[in-house]
């Protein structure tokens, strides 16, 4: 802890944590996805998705520290490449959700507890990481956000950004996991009716497609 406080300016870091919490609390694509997955697929998958989003935040931190974000920001070709890969992936997720039948809660064990299909949790971690990491606007946000709270007088600016990025990822994971768990509990009550489960799957699919269209219109500026 002492070493970290030597690396960081305590006043700057405290301000950063407040700003980060405000940013994380603001509604956005990741929080909407977490809610939708919690409602349609249950707490476990929503919390796994939250972990994936946290991992995605770490990738953006690394890009910012290594200067890759600046390269992408300066190159229309690279920005477009990342954007269109993200669009294609979101569209694929949307189609998969629209084609889904039933829900996580449709299959129960002998004691009546909902069980997740094989690979469901690990798949959600991967989805959370990719949907976040493949959003170039998030990449540019980290590049612009983190340096504002560094103190060049302490040196090791990259290390300061890395620590702040780790803090951002941790807060994001905890906040979204709590959000997903709450949505999952509500979903367990609603999904006792198969018709509602199907509607929630469709709503999740529409959300992913909508996010793909939103990303499609994103520009570097």
Image (spheres, rainbow, N blue to C red):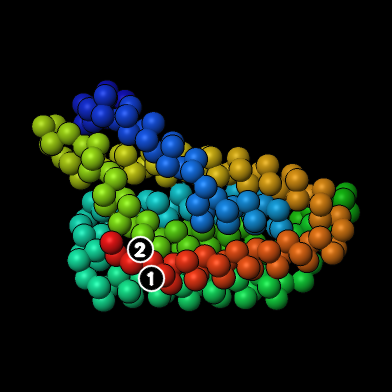
Quadrant of the rendered image containing residue 19: top left
Quadrant of the rendered image containing residue 136: bottom left
Q: Which mark is residue 136?
A: 2
Q: Residue at x 76, y 64 (%)?
A: 199
Q: Is residue 159 visible?
A: no
Q: Which mark is residue 64?
A: none
- Horizontally, residue 103 falls left or right of residue 204, namely right
- Horizontally, residue 140 falls left or right of residue 203, namely left
Quadrant assignment for the N terminus: top left
Q: Secondary structure at mark 1?
A: helix
Q: Is residue 214 visible?
A: yes
How far, Cα to Cα, is label 1 from label 2? 6 Å
Categorize mark 2 by other alpha carbons within 10 Å: few (<14), some (14-19), many (20+): many
Q: What residue would you read off at disc 1?
A: 83
Q: Residue at x 61, y 43 (%)?
A: 179
Q: Residue at x 21, y 37 (%)?
A: 150
């Amino acid at each position: 802890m002492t070493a970290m406080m030597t690396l960081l300016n305590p006043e700057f870091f405290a301000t950063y944590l407040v700003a980060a919490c405000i940013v994380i609390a603001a509604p956005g694509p990741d929080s909407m996805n977490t809610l939708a997955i919690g409602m349609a697929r249950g707490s476990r998958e929503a919390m796994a998705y939250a972990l994936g989003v946290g991992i995605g935040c770490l990738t953006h931190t690394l890009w910012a520290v290594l200067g890759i974000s600046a390269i992408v920001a300066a190159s229309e070709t690279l920005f477009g490449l990342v954007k269109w890969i993200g669009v294609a992936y979101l569209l694929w997720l949307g189609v998969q959700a629209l084609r889904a039948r039933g829900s996580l809660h449709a299959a129960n064990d002998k004691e009546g507890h909902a069980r997740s299909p094989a690979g469901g949790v690990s798949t959600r971690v991967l989805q959370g990481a990719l949907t976040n990491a493949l959003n170039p606007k998030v990449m540019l946000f980290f590049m612009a956000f983190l340096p504002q709270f560094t103190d060049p007088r302490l040196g090791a600016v990259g290390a300061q950004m890395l620590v702040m990025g780790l803090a951002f990822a941790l807060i994001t994971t905890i906040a979204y996991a709590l959000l997903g768990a709450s949505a999952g509990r509500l979903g367990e009550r609603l999904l006792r009716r198969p018709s509602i489960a199907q509607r929630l799957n469709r709503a999740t699919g529409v959300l992913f497609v909508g996010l793909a269209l939103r990303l499609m219109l994103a520009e570097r500026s």
